[in-house]
Amino acid sequence: MIKAITGTRDTLAADIPKWNYLQAIVESVFSKFNYKEIRTPIFEETTLFARGIGEATDIVGKEMYTFVDRSGESITLRPEMTAGVVRAFIEHSLDKKQNLNKLFYIGPMFRQERPQAGRFRQFHQFGAEALGSNDPLLDAEMIIMAYDIFARLGLKNLLVKINSLGVTSSRESYKNILRNYLEPHFEKLTTESKKRFETNILRLFDSKEENDCKIMENAPLLIEYLDEESLEHFEKVKQALLASHIPFEIDARLVRGLDYYTHTTFEVVSGSVGSQSALCGGGRYNLLVKELGGGETPGIGFAAGIERILLACENEKSFSIEDEKLDLFIVTIEKGLENFAYQTAVNFRRKGLTVDLDYLRRSVKAQMREANRMNSKYVLLIGGDEFARGEVVLKNMSNGEQKIFSKNDSEEIFLSIKEN
RNA sequence: GUGAGCAUAGCUCAGUUGGUUAGAGCAUCUGGUUGUGGCCCAGAAGGUCGUGGGUUCGAUCCCCAUUGCUCACCCCA
């Protein structure tokens, strides 16, 4: 048997309503904040991600689905969306058409990691990017949108974490301070941490190794060394969140591994999923557009993992969706009436009803069972004495009542069903 | 990439200290109503016990390998 590739999965019909429900909420919230949808290709030139996300990151280093196509070009299945959106932003000179571009997206992403609860190789994200303004109100707006979406899905067990990485200059001088602090402890660090000491010293805060943690406990925090401008920016973000009633907590250890990040970074974690608890993450990236060849353009964005969110919803039973109902199921009582039943079904469908009928030539009992299984509100019985007299029977499945109609009076039948 | 656990019917799971025809619940189908669903009752169908090898008179059970799944680590959504 051929099976779906590791880390990918089928979303069967029974689960589609949940996805549609989530998507409707996502689109609704984004559109209230006046974000417009953008769709970019699922694969891009490998260079885009290597430069956009950063060569030193795990995503680029070991998780990308990269392959050479028939023309010899290196292609990569997108592991995240920001790089693609920024590429499109630059390619189409969107900054020339509008000073501020507020965009959102929803779609599949790909990373070759070992699957786990809330983690897949093909997974889905929705997210937003605001390109063209450094206003801290936009930083807060990202968090508010994410929070509102989670709230509308009924999620409770949430924690919003924010931090500020400041601007490059203050961060660089802080890095030196951190380096000086760590120098005497260097030999005690884990191999991985020693490597990070060179490549991205900030990520030493991410380490979960006990000894590393002990060393980092007393390390100077970036937030204590932020310059005036950065502090002011961060302060405004916090004020906006407070004013919008978003509970949050400052996490000085919340470091994202990308060099171009500036100012705000944030994450929303759920206590209702497994160890992969981050439902969304994002931050400001004022250097990325330039890095990818565009003009100097400030930007901020976030991405949220749909599988994780639905898992949290499932575990919290945060919402329920009513089963889809059929308006009408048509039952034929004897052979030879299939064509009439079929045409009747087509007619009612064209009038706007949801209609189905038996395609397996089953017994009346089996057809009735099927109607019941399909949650049909009504059954139209065709055949027998009534049909010989030119009549059909309409049965209300919730109370069992039956009404007789002339077989040609489809409008009366339609109205009778429509009423309910 | 590393580690641990699991693999029996469509689904959820029993089971055998190695012994004849491998079980249950749910779902499916048929009948109880020659033309009527849900509840109930009776019955049926459905399994190479993940795959390959070994030990044994005999393996679904023990051993080895392999594949897949799950969870965790790393990291991230």
Image (spheres, coloured by chain):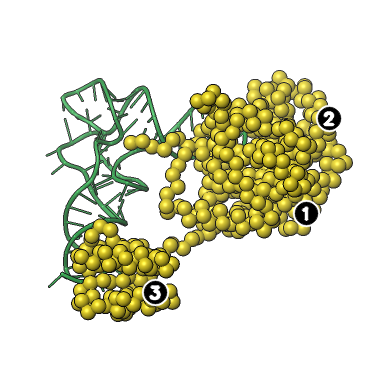
**Tag nearer the camera, 1 or 3:** 3
- Report which quarter residue A246 is drawn in: bottom right
Q: In which quarter of the image is residue A230?
A: top right
What amino acid does circle 2 point to?
Ser
Q: Which amino acid does label 1 sit on?
A: Ala
Q: Position of residue A14 (x, y in %)?
A: 42, 54
Q: Can residue A262 be seen in this view?
A: no
Tag 1 and tag 3 share a subunit: yes
Please state if A398 lies on the left or on the right of A142 as rendered: left
Q: Which residue is drawn at 83% across and 34% down?
A: A170
The residue singled out by tag 1 in the image is A240
Q: Which chain appears yellow?
A: A
Q: Characterize the local packing of mark 3: few (<14), some (14-19) or many (20 or more) Cα atoms within 10 angstroms.
A: some
Mark carried by residue A173: 2
What is the C-alpha distance between the residues marked 2 and 1?
29 Å
Image-based side of A151 in relation to A320, left or right: right
Q: Which amino acid type is marked by label 3? A: Phe
